[in-house]
Amino acid sequence: MEPRVSQASRRTVVVLAAGEGKRMKSATPKVLHELLGRTLVGHVLAAAGPAAAERTIVVVGHQADQVRAHLAEIAPEAVPVLQAEQNGTGHAVRIALDAAPDATGTVLVLSGDAPLLRGETVAALIEAHEAGNRAATVLAAAVDDPTGLGRIVRDASGGLARIVEERDASAEVRAIREINGGIYAFDVVALRDALGKLSTDNDQGEEYLTDVFGLLVEVGSPVGVFVAPDAAETLGANDRAQLAGLRAMLRDRVNTAWMRSGVAILDPATTWIDVTVTIEPDAVIDQNSQLRGGTSVAAGAVIGPDTTLIDTTVAAGATVLRTHSIGALIGPDATVGPFSFLRPGTRLGRKSKVGGFVEAKNAELGDGAKVPHLTYVGDATIGAKANIGAGTIFANYDGVNKHHTTVGEAAFVGSDTVLIAPVEIGPGAYVAAGSAIQKEVPAGNLGVTRAPQRNVEGWTARRRAGTVSAEAAERAAAEKKGE
Ligand code: UD1
Ligand code: CA
């Protein structure tokens, strides 16, 4: 649980997400690019959670339809407000507040492209702002390279004097390494008033939200700086290389948190865990593994190496080695892999086994059931302790419809069998290797469709004379004679 600040009502969150993000060079709007299970804007909205805002407004502009559709999915309570022309961050906030004429209290403004912001930091920023009864508070950070960012200019006593954009800054101001993180808390009355006074007299000819601070200082309103505990929280992504950098930072943050909570991550540099995943202590995640979406892993399970789990539930003590799984449920102490492919609707019982080169879809394996090698199991129910031989194919598709196969408890299906659905193998029944089964095999019966074998004597010598096979056959015949 992230901490929530008190005064749950009387807050409005405004997320700025109208910009184009040209340098991504993508048909996807910048704020919809993804890292570890959420879009950029999804991360920002999650960080805003502790603000417990009455209302959340997202300013959309470029590719607004795509952004709106995404918001409807992930945050239906958020209200998209269109900024048809991007005339600057101040203009964007002004349009947002026009859509919220009754807003009172605190307005939290967040940049839609800063996904590393943490809820704890948002809570602390709001607390500092509200406890200090300020008109405005900016989240700042000290960085080694402030290139391109707004600078925090302080007065002689260390208070905030103004924020200056780099392109409008003197050499002296450019030398400042304390930057504006683009995240702010405002008193709504003071903010509205200052927004009405913004000019476009700057290098970009835009209304800068940052100018609000200088205007408030001029009229003697209290403003403050809140320094981010970790400068990375203010980082934005302008191109795909920067996005990959943020993704790696988030990976490290997520992995560190899981390790601190008792999860063994053997190679954190190659382990990628979505922020939506849950893992119990004493689970082991081996190298080069990805846990995505709604995946959960219980205590004592061993995942990887080289495993991808998407929306997969792994119960305690299961082992999942070199596997790709999506939408599967892996039961307690089950073993999966290497080289297994589990698809949606796969449900593996306690101590069941899915082995090498097995694909399963919409298939239920009872407790202790085994599908050890080279098999396709589609649309099937397999009873407890049943054994499915190597190379068995559950032929579930007739070209038009999918059909179901049922294999009873402790049934034994021999290798290289085709089970042509719909079909049923009864409890304790056997199927002879190499059979093509299309009728029921009742409980305790043996089903066999194998053709009888016939040997043609001397065939190799007659029909393959002069080959290495004929020579080998000849030697074998001579040895047998000599015996
Ligand atoms: C802004 C700040 C800068 C700060 C930096 C931190 C201003 C004038 N400058 O600069 O001081 O250091 O963020 O990252 O605010 N947006 C809109 N509508 C607009 C313009 C922008 O919605 O008309 C959105 C963008 O999509 C983006 C956010 O506002 O999500 C910030 O805009 P951006 O153009 O990236 O501002 P910076 O130049 O980075
Ligand atoms: Ca930016």
Image: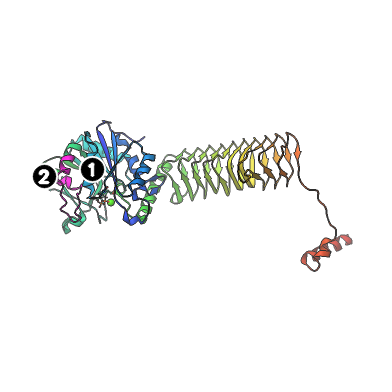
User: Which of the 4 image quadrants contains residue 126?
Assistant: top left
- Give the vertical position of 255 relative to 459 (above or below): above
Residue 238 drawn at (x, y percent) = 32, 54
Left or right? Give the position of 263 relative to 393. left
Please tell me whether residue 128 belongs to the stretch shown in magenta: no
Residue 288 drawn at (x, y percent) = 49, 51
Single out the residue that lies furthest toward the front: 400
Q: Which residue is mark 2?
A: 218
User: Does residue 396 appear in the picture of this structure?
Assistant: yes
- Give the vertical position of 348 relative to 356 (above or below): above
The magenta region covers: 191-214
x 81%, y 62%: residue = 460
- Is ligand 1 within 8 Å of the beta carbon of the residue shown at mark 2? no
Q: Nearer the viewer, residue 198 or 257?
A: 198
- Is the residue under label 1 in contact with that under label 2 (CB below 8 Å)? no
Single out the residue that lies furthest toward the bottom: 466
User: Does residue 265 appear in the picture of this structure?
Assistant: no
Q: Which residue is mark 1?
A: 95
Residue 426 drawn at (x, y percent) = 70, 35
Q: Secondary structure at mark 1?
A: helix
x 43%, y 51%: residue = 269
User: If the image is split into quadrants, where does the C terminus sit?
Assistant: bottom right
Amino acid, disc 2: Glu
Q: Nearer the viewer, residue 242 or 209?
A: 209
